[in-house]
Amino acid sequence: MHSSERIWRPHLVLGKDRRLNPEGADRLERIAVVVLCHGGKVLARRRPPSVPWGNFWEFPGGRINPGESPGEAALRECREETGISLPNCEFLGKLFQDAPHAKQEVFFFGAEYPGDQTLQIGDWAPGPETQHPMGDYLWIPLEQISLLEWPPVNREMLPAILAWIRSHS
């Protein structure tokens, strides 16, 4: 390996190994994610191939703005990314990870789709990944979500997410 090549490995806890992301080692990025469920399905989409964890699946979410609570950010991100306005969401937990550009504190929230909004969202179907365009949110059946590829913190959080969804069904 050449000295100019960076080594990068995901971690689910904040590590002390600064070689993992030397440019952003002291930077903490706060992320809010909302797991939206409806009728035994969860809303998710595939990440673009050019970003970390490209082609993996993700829930609606993004950076928490200064002065914004994690819950407020989860509701805002859901509205911005999907057009779905939620009245509230429930805190499910938080995890840490080292990303290539910064350490991340990821807050997970759960919410039930209120059902009072018209959506143009398709259903996930088994088959080649190419049949699901990148960036399009899909309703994924609960029994399928653990079979898909997720970024590390999402994967780590799946048991808690599934338990929360089942307790609200």
Image: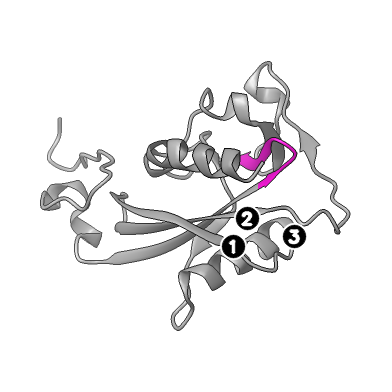
Proximity of marks 2 and 1: CB atoms separated by less than 8 Å:
yes
Quadrant occupied by the C terminus: top right
* The residue positioned farthest toward the bottom in the image shown: 67
Would you place residue 163 above or below residue 71 in this image?
A: above
Q: Mark 2 or mark 3: which comes first in sequence?
A: 3
* Residue plotted at (30% across, 49% down): 97
Among the 4 quarters of the image, the one containing residue 78: bottom right
- Residue 22, given in percent of the width and then of the height, sits at 18, 55
* The residue positioned farthest toward the top in the image shown: 127
- The range drawn in magenta is 37-46
Q: Is residue 85 visible?
A: yes
Is residue 31 left or right of 134 when viewed as pictured?
A: left
Mark 2 or 3, closer to the camera: 2
Amino acid type of the residue tagged 2 in the rendering = Ala
* Distance from Cα at disc 2 to Cα at disc 3: 11 Å
Res 111 label? 2
Neighbour class for label 2 at 10 Å: few (<14), some, many (≥20)?
many
Would you place residue 104 above or below residue 8 in this image?
A: below
Q: Main secondary structure of the magenta part?
A: strand
Magenta run includes residue 149: no
- Residue 98, given in percent of the width and then of the height, sits at 27, 50
| Secondary element at tag 2 | strand
Proximity of marks 3 and 1: CB atoms separated by less than 8 Å:
no
* Residue plotted at (63% across, 46% down): 168
Residue at label 1?
89
Q: Mark 2 or mark 1: which comes first in sequence?
A: 1
Amino acid type of the residue tagged 3 in the rendering = Ile
Residue at label 3?
84
* Distance from Cα at disc 2 to Cα at disc 1: 5 Å
* Residue plotted at (73% across, 23% down): 125
